[in-house]
Amino acid sequence: MQRRTVLGAMRTAAAGGWAALVGYPAARFLTAPLADAQEAASADAPFRRVERLARLSPGKISVAPVRGDKTDAWTVRRDVAIGRVFLRLEEEPGDDPTGVTVSAFNTICPHSGCQVTRATTEEMTFFCGCHDGRFGEDGELVEAPDYTHPSPRGLDELPARVEVDDATGEAWVAVAFQDFVVGTAEKTPRS
């Protein structure tokens, strides 16, 4: 074998190694949004503890922050506020708090993504000040004469359950928090 052939083979191997070293991370970077979207679409939202059951009163609305990890490009911030929910305890807890029904709604308006607040009138429970969105205590749209509702759907209801902490025995409300695409009649999870 000639020296020239050996050096050529070494040069080709080195170039291939460098291409793989640079090409693999570049390919992962370019395909990461696709993998994240598929993972978000296939996975159900995890239940997150948002409020102690003892702090809720039957029939009264309360607001609770939802905490979790927030990823922004390459930065991951741990245990930060990722949203808020409205909570309503439907009945007084009995001996088994896990049997209690709690309603939970995302505080984001399905019309254009503004924050919804609690209303102070009897005709509606929730109000979006951006475009006069009105919602009842069940999260549904409130219709009235001479009023066209801007939102294409009611507030986004979220699955909620009561969990008992094994260490403390304290009952917590846990919510499967998720944001949804705004401006559409369909309740589509945001990836």
Image: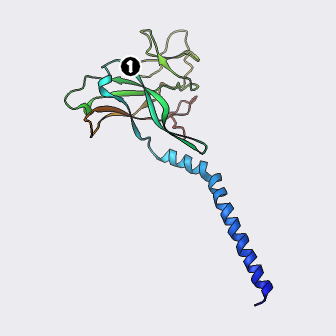
Instruction: Identify the residue at the far bottom of this view.
Output: 1
On screen, residue 82 above or below 118: below
Res 111 → quadrant: top right
For residue 61, side relative to residue 129 (left or right): left
Name above or below for residue 172 compared with residue 31.
Answer: above
User: Is 146 in front, or is 118?
Assistant: 118
Image x and y of residue 154, in percent: 48, 24
**What amino acid type is highlighted by mark number 1?**
Ile
Residue under the image location 29 percent in, 25 percent down: 54
Count of marks, rendered view: 1
- Identified at 35% across, 17% down, the residue is 60
| Residue 25 picture location, percent across and down | 64, 58
* Residue 7 percent location from the top left of the image: 77, 81
Q: Quadrant of residue 3?
A: bottom right
- What is the residue that sits farthest to the left in this orientation? 95
Give the side of residue 66 with respect to residue 130, left or right.
Answer: left
Q: Residues within 10 Å of mark 1 (few under 14, many from 20)?
A: some
Q: Is residue 46 above or below residue 134?
A: below
The foreground one among 75 and 59 is 75
State which quarter of the image contains the C terminus: top right
Residue 69 x/y as whole percent: 49, 40
**Residue placed under numbered mark 1 in the picture:** 61
